[in-house]
Image (spheres, coloured by chain):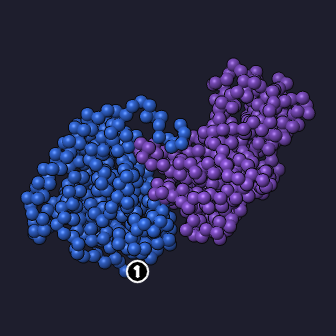
């Protein structure tokens, strides 16, 4: 089974590029603000930041619409925003407000917006994989042309449910994509110490098209995803994409507290990857190719900063959930 | 009206619900051929778009059911033996029971998990568990334990047409109990128990396959001049606490017969509810007739020893009433 081809830039015009830059920059601004606020003691819980991985969510979700599904993981803010979730509802949820995406019931690790096809971040590593496989099966049965994407990390690649899902989805030719964001860390363990062999080889063994891409290159991710999404929409079954990237932040912002100085990675490694920052790389590429006017991107930055400020103000001025809400939502048909 | 075994009633009901609503789908291991007979014949009439064998992958099946439900299907996931839910338990415990709550009610999960439970068949501990206490504790899953063919039909329809995850547990040994099942369409609400036998001296709450034992015991007790009321709660989540409390108010005595292991059993929960809310109505301690705190043995003589029996119910009730 040959590797998937890397695709072409056909169809990648200025609008698509601007749109992906918007998503990446929006995520980065949000994550940096959340990190800053956590360190300043302004958040109620630790956050798992997506900084450094933005190109993966942006490049894949660029091909999706609200009828397509994604399942995310504990590092889910980026997926939530890339799939169309609003900054306001995200920030309000993280601040446990009634106006949050989940009315303050899920919080940072569980943001969801089903109206946008975002089935939720998930606190269980690998927890979203089976859910999204079910969504893919439903769309397959309906012949809707909608597709379903499992976003998971290299940490989830060692969960058994991934093997089960890859087998069934290949066998049933489900319209889905396994989007593995290999950020080199399974929580606090370097993945090289817990994972054996090449991930894409597992997909290839199942005769599933598979490709390893530079996950910090949004254009490369976009190209690979275009082929995978087209294949899924047209009945060609699942694709496995391994996007090589790096978790610029820690596993969770609270870690400096509980690790008590223990190191699990070299600062030189972090620095080396900062040089491959997906947003900087996009800007550099754009400067060289002149695809999008610089002024357009600068205007966009200003808009995104304003958007975040407004979202912060909205979240902080929103009410807490009402007490009775603690006892709602367990069941649709009766009380808990 | 027809005489049907419990498992046949389930099979009939699945045919009816498949015909009634094209969004109902079913999948699981070997569901096309069907070990127990509950899903037999569906694949011939409805084909693979509605009912499909899955790989032996419980971790996937339990979660797929939720994803497909969120995307618009009404899903029945068949887990064969209830012990197999343990290999698929993440999606039951962490997802099915919590996602609606965690997302602030954004989405419903109309999923019915079907699984056979219980001992008495010499298939030993990996195929004989009665795991509803675990499910009851999860919070967000209906737990349905029909004892008759009539109830199996009405309750299964409620589960399939409902908007929440439900576990429909079938006591499928040798096809389950035989009973009258009307031909017409009907549903039975969750959380409504039924008084199987009216009585005055003692309340026996019996769950699922234990109902028949309790009724046999009640008939025997009656000959000894003890009037036992037998209550079948039919569903454990939600639980018809009012029916149990009213009965205890009348009889002053409570025995709970439950096929789960004693520690943290459904019986323990019911006992706690009654002790808490009807203590002053009680004339005697609450008694539980449950499975011993051991794994289910293979040898038939040992299996009989650890499971509730008519004799044990008779003994416990007699001592309780005479004390």
- Judge left or right: residue A156 versus residue B322: left
Is A311 above or below relative to B275?
Answer: below
Give the quarter of the image for residue A70. bottom left
Is B91 above or below relative to B34?
Answer: above
Q: Nearer the viewer, residue A246 or B193?
A: B193
Is B209 above or below relative to A237?
Answer: above
Q: Position of residue B184 (x, y in %)?
A: 70, 53
Residue located 45% across and 64% down the image:
A139
Q: Position of residue B46 (x, y in %)?
A: 61, 68
Q: Position of residue A230 (x, y in %)?
A: 35, 72
Q: Residue furthest bottom?
A: A2
- Judge left or right: residue A278 versus residue B43: left
Which of the image's four quarters has the C terminus of chain B? top right
Q: Which residue is mark 1?
A: A1
Q: Chain of mark 1?
A: A
Chain identifier matching the purple colour in the rendered picture: B
- Judge left or right: residue B3 versus residue A334: right
């Amino acid at each position: 089974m040959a590797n998937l081809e890397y695709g072409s830039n056909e169809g990648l015009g200025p609008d698509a590029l601007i749109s992906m830059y918007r998503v990446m920059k929006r995520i980065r601004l949000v994550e940096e603000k959340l990190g800053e606020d956590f360190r300043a003691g302004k958040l109620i819980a630790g956050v798992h930041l997506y900084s450094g991985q933005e190109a993966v969510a942006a490049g894949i979700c660029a091909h999706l619409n609200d009828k397509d599904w994604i399942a995310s993981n504990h590092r889910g803010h980026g997926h939530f925003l890339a799939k169309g979730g609003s900054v306001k509802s995200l920030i309000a949820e993280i601040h446990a407000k009634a106006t949050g995406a989940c009315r303050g019931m899920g919080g940072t690790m569980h943001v969801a917006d089903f109206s946008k096809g975002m089935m939720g971040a998930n606190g269980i590593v690998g927890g979203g994989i089976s859910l999204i496989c079910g969504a893919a099966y439903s769309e397959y049965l309906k012949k809707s042309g909608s597709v379903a994407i499992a976003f998971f990390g290299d940490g989830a690649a060692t969960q058994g449910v991934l093997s089960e899902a890859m087998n069934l989805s290949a066998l049933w030719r489900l319209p889905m994509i396994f989007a593995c964001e290999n950020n080199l860390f399974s929580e606090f363990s370097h993945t090289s110490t817990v994972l054996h062999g090449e991930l894409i080889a597992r997909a290839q063994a199942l005769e599933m098209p598979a490709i390893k891409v530079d996950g910090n290159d949004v254009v490369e991710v976009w190209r690979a995803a275009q082929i995978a999404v087209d294949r899924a929409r047209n009945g060609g079954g699942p694709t496995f994409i391994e996007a090589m990237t790096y978790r610029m932040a820690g596993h969770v912002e609270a870690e400096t507290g509980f690790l008590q100085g223990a190191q699990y990675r070299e600062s030189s490694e972090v620095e080396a990857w900062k040089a491959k920052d997906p947003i900087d790389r996009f800007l550099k590429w754009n400067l060289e190719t002149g695809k999008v006017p610089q002024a357009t991107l600068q205007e966009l930055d200003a808009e995104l900063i304003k958007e975040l400020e407004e979202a912060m103000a909205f979240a902080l001025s929103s009410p807490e959930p009402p007490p009775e809400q603690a006892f709602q939502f367990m069941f649709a048909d009766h009380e808990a | 009206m027809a005489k049907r075994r419990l498992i046949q009633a389930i099979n009939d009901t699945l045919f009816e619900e498949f015909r009634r609503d094209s969004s109902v789908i079913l999948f699981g291991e070997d569901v096309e051929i069907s070990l127990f007979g509950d899903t037999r014949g569906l694949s011939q009439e409805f084909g693979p778009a509605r009912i499909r064998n899955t790989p032996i992958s419980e971790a996937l099946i339990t979660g797929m059911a939720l994803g497909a439900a969120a995307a618009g299907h009404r899903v029945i996931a068949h887990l064969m033996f209830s012990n197999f839910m343990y290999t698929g338990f993440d999606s039951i415990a962490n997802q099915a029971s919590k996602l609606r709550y965690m997302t602030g009610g954004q989405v419903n999960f109309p999923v019915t998990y079907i699984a056979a439970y219980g001992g008495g068949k010499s298939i030993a501990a990996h195929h004989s568990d009665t795991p509803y206490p675990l499910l009851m504790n999860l919070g967000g899953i209906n737990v349905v334990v029909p004892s008759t063919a009539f109830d199996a039909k009405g309750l299964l329809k409620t589960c399939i047409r409902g908007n929440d995850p439900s576990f429909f547990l079938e006591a499928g040994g040798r096809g389950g109990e035989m009973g009258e099942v009307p031909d017409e369409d009907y549903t039975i609400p969750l959380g409504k128990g039924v008084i199987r036998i009216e009585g005055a001296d003692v309340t026996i709450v019996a769950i699922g396959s234990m109902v028949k034992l309790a009724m046999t015991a009640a008939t025997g007790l009656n000959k000894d001049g003890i009037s036992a009321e037998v209550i079948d709660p039919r569903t454990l989540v939600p639980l018809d606490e009012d029916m149990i409390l009213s009965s205890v108010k009348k009889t002053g005595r409570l025995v709970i017969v439950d096929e789960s292991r004693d520690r943290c059993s459904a019986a323990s929960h019911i006992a706690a509810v009654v002790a808490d809310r009807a203590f002053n109505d009680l004339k005697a301690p609450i008694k539980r007739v449950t499975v011993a705190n051991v794994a289910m043995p293979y040898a038939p003589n040992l299996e009989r020893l650890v499971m509730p029996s008519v004799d044990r119910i008779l003994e416990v009730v007699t001592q309780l009433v005479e004390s």
